[in-house]
Image (tube, rainbow, N blue to C red):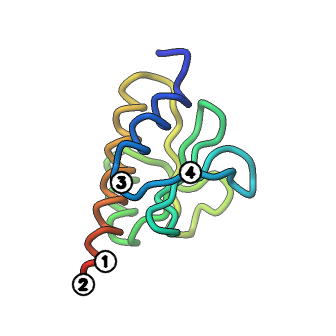
Amino acid sequence: MNANVRQIFIDQLLSWPEVTQQPHRFGGIEFLFIGKEIGHLHGDHLVDLLMPKSFRDQLIVSGRAQPHHIYPDSGWVSVYLTSNEDVTNAIELLRYKYDYLVAKRNE
């Protein structure tokens, strides 16, 4: 796996329109779309995202995400980054959340 996972996420997400980053309150980097959190990265090993509940459940059943490492019964999911495929999956899920936030803004 690429040694600079953090930079991969920064480069990818900041290339999306109106996305910014800031420190996350529990450590790591938080990515935002016009002030709404897309997700956050802890170090180079874990991404957390808040998803609509029905989609969250599908992600867990399919194995694309796990229940949140601290709040397993919430809408949050965790994606552990142990391979290049995990990084690709996490970026795809972050993109889903970004597209969801863009669509909600345009409603």
- Residue 75 % position (x, y): 50, 68
Q: Residue at x 49, y 64 (%)?
A: 50
Q: Is residue 79 above or below residue 39?
A: above
Q: Amino acid at mark 1?
A: Lys
Mark earlier in primary sequence (4, 3):
4
Position of residue 75 in the picture relative to residue 57 (left or right): right
Is residue 28 found left or right of 38 in the rendered image?
right
Q: Above or below — where is 5 with respect to 78?
A: above
Q: Which residue is mark 2?
A: 107
Q: Residue at x 52, y 63 (%)?
A: 37
Q: Which of marks 2 and 3 precedes in the sequence?
A: 3
- Between the C-alphas of marks 3 and 2, the distance is 25 Å
Q: Quick check: marks 4 and 2 in contact, CB under 8 Å?
A: no
Classed neighbour count for the residue bearing mark 3: other residues with Cα under 10 Å, few (<14), some (14–19), many (≥20): some
Percent of width and height locating residue 14: 43, 44
In terms of secondary structure, where does tag 1 sit?
A: helix
Q: Which residue is mark 1?
A: 104
